[in-house]
Amino acid sequence: METIEEMIANYGINNFVLALLIIITTGFAKIPLKLITAKWRNKGVNLNKYIVLLPILFGIGYAALYTYLFCGTAWSEDTLSIALTSTTLSLSIYAITEKLFEKKKNESIKEKRDCIEVTEKTDSDKTDQTKHFIIKR
């Protein structure tokens, strides 16, 4: 895994800062989309599939803003290169941090009991216990 200094040396400080901006704005933009999707789920509206496109859109927008501020024009020959580099760098950083700080799902005892149902069967003298697993999606 690359260190931050190596990443900045390879991609440049401008792409690294743009990647961090993309991660932050994507994180803030995901919150209302997830709330709307949760609210309108029964109506068939699912906006979660569009969250994947947010880093690409923010990357192009931030690259155009960067080239406008530092080159004087909103679109130059470097804009697309900066957009793709900063977007892929942001996705890489996001994937690495998600893997390092993975959320552990803590199941409560009640949830475990809800998933396992034990029934007793009495055939003559034998008592069989069978477990039925209920998978919730």
Image (tube, rainbow, N blue to C red):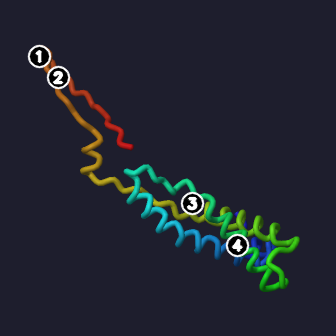
Q: Residues within 10 Å of mark 1 (few under 14, many from 20)?
A: few
Q: Are marks 2 and 4 in contact (CB under 8 Å)?
A: no
Image height of 104 relative to 122, above or below: below
**Image quadrant assignment for residue 26:** bottom right
Nearer the observer, disc 2 or disc 3? Answer: 3
Q: Specify the amino acid type for callout 1.
A: Asp
Instruction: Looking at the picture, tell me which residue is in the foreground, 52 or 97.
Output: 52
Considering every residue shown, the one lying at the far top of the view is 124
Image height of 80 relative to 37, above or below: below
Q: Which mark is residue 61?
A: 4
**SS at circle 1:** loop
The CA span between labels 4 and 1 is: 74 Å
Q: Which residue is mark 2?
A: 121
The CA span between labels 2 and 4 is: 65 Å
**SS at circle 2:** strand
Q: Which mark is residue 51?
A: 3
Q: Which mark is residue 48?
A: none
Image height of 40 relative to 25, above or below: above
The CA span between labels 4 and 3 is: 16 Å
Marked residue nearer the N-terminal end (4 or 3): 3
Tell me the residue at 72%/63% (across/down): 88
Tell me the residue at 83%/81% (across/down): 73
Considering every residue shown, the one lying at the far left of the view is 124
Q: Specify the amino acid type for callout 3.
A: Ile
Tell me the residue at 27%/39% (across/down): 116
In the image, 76: left or right of 41?
right
Q: Which residue is mark 1?
A: 125
